[in-house]
Image (spheres, helix red, strand yellow):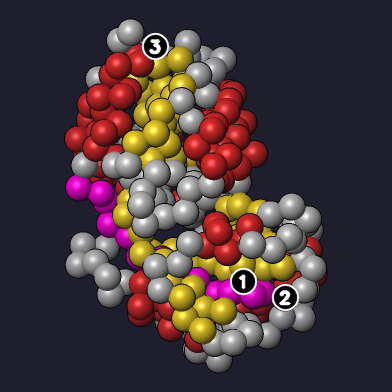
Amino acid sequence: MDSFKQNAVVFDCAGTLVEMYRVTKELKTGKIILDADNLKLVTESTGRGLIIIDTPLSLMQTQPPERLLSDFLRQEKIPFGVAYAAKGFDAGDISRILMTDKTEIRHFLETNLEAVSQFDDIIYEVFGFIIDSNENRITHAMSTGGKLFDSARSVAAAAAVNCDLFIASGDDYGNLNRVADKLGIPLDNVVGLCDDAKKEKIVRELQSHYPKVIMIGDGINDILAMKAADFSILISRSNYHTPNELKDAADEIVDDLGECTEVLNGYILE
């Protein structure tokens, strides 16, 4: 990598650059959870993992509602990745559980209708599920709709003056590339389907090219990257659960993305 600037900023995407509205269905009870905190749902039980499906929205939406998710993933060769996992989760269990799982596409279509109704200027649509190694089943189906935060363009533009910009996120590449394009971030600097360990690895690799690497995120799956970074900014919003251990890992805590410009410049220019 040829570095042109002395600093690198790594952004999480969902919840950091993009305002998200997550809708999750608890499959056992049929309960629909509006504005769900999926990372919190994962951490509520050992053995759970949040899996993101890397599929074009149009392909999922045109599937017969009764089609099994397992059949869809296998027959269409759909990639997926672990965005976050609790203790006791084994990624090797995903394929084993999917072999006998009977979750139908209709659950994802149902959550998608709710998720995209929140915003008029949708840029981000994600499908995923929570799977439980202990219960040997998919416990939740989820869909997310999102739009850029109003301050995202100005924050990215200000950061780009002194920094090369990167995105490391648990979500799929289609959504991430759309966000990167809107913000002027090179697509080569986008890494998707990241869990917390992969985000940390990205930060450490960048540290071999840049004197200062800054991590900006909002969720528990950013904690390892924040600890590894030379400087980290946590966006802790009042409507989203922020564990104390995540707050302890951050060098600076703000409650709005727009505040990051001043904090970032203060660190870089000190």
Apparent side of residue 172 relative to residue 115 in the rendered image (left or right): right
Q: Residue at x 27, y 70 (%)?
A: 118
Residue 124 visible, this orientation? no
Q: Which residue is mark 1?
A: 73
Up-down: is 239 above or below 133?
A: above
Disc 1 to disc 3, C-alpha distance: 42 Å
Q: Amino acid at mark 1?
A: Leu
- Give the residue pinned by disc 2: 137
Question: Residue 214: where, in percent of width, then height?
Answer: 44, 24
Residue matched to label 3: 6
Marks 1, 2: nearer the viewer: 2
Disc 3, SS: loop
Q: Which SS class for mark 2?
A: strand
| Lower position in the chain sequence, tag 3 or tag 2 | 3
The spot of residue 73 in percent (x, y) is 62, 71
Give the residue type that dot 3 points to. Answer: Gln
Range covered by the magenta-colored residues: 138-150
Depth order, front residue of 101/55: 101
Q: Nearer the viewer, residue 75 or 135?
A: 135
- Residue 79 lies, with reference to residue 5, above or below; the image says below
